[in-house]
Amino acid sequence: QVRLVESGGGLVQAGGSLRLSCAASGSIVSINAMRWHRQAPGKQRELVARISSGGATYYADSVKGRFTISRENAKNTVDLQMNSLKPEDTAVYYCNADVFSVPGGNKGYWGQGTQVTVSS
């Protein structure tokens, strides 16, 4: 069984910073893409950032230049450094990863989510 566990959410004032972390555990052979998504109240879940196993990154336009995604393959972790936070960044943030495990094979897994609240 593979688990993803997020940490690092909280309450911060606009303009502040937070760092989210996600750790994958279980019978993992390899992890391909790792992603951060978010879901604000009343809105659909959206992709915030993605990083490949080789380090290639993608960012949603709304967070470019403010958020940085990074990973440590040896530790099966992915982080999201969030700077210059805005009230519209308020959401539950979810970690997602494409994992090859034994005996599960290739599957996508999700964390339980961590709340980020940005006050104005």
Image (cartoon, rainbow, N blue to C red):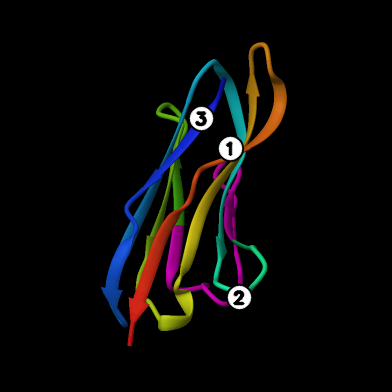
Could you tell me the amino acid type at mark 1?
Answer: Ser
- Residue on which disc 2 sits: 61
* Spatial separation of the CA atoms under disc 1 and disc 3: 18 Å
Q: Is residue 84 visible?
A: no
Query: Quadrant location of residue 32?
Result: top right
For label 1, the SS is loop
The image quadrant where one finds the C terminus is bottom left
Query: Quadrant location of residue 85?
Result: bottom left
Report the residue that reaches farthest toward the front: 42
Relative depth, front residue between 54 and 11: 11
* Spatial separation of the CA atoms under disc 2 and disc 3: 29 Å
Is residue 76 located in the magenta-colored stretch of the structure? Answer: no
Q: Nearer the viewer, mark 2 or mark 3?
A: 3
* Residue 11, position as x, y percentages in the image: 29, 69
Relative depth, front residue between 78 and 73: 78
- Residue on which disc 1 sits: 53
Q: Nearer the viewer, mark 2 or mark 1?
A: 2
The span picked out in magenta is 48-68
Asked whether, in this view, residue 63 is left or right of residue 18, the answer is right
Could you tell me the amino acid type at mark 3?
Answer: Arg
Could you tell me the amino acid type at mark 2?
Answer: Asp
* Residue 81, position as x, y percentages in the image: 37, 59
Image marks 2 and 1: residues in contact by CB distance under 8 Å: no
* Residue 24, position as x, y percentages in the image: 47, 31
> Which residue lies at the image location 51% right of the left edge and 30% below the top edge?
3
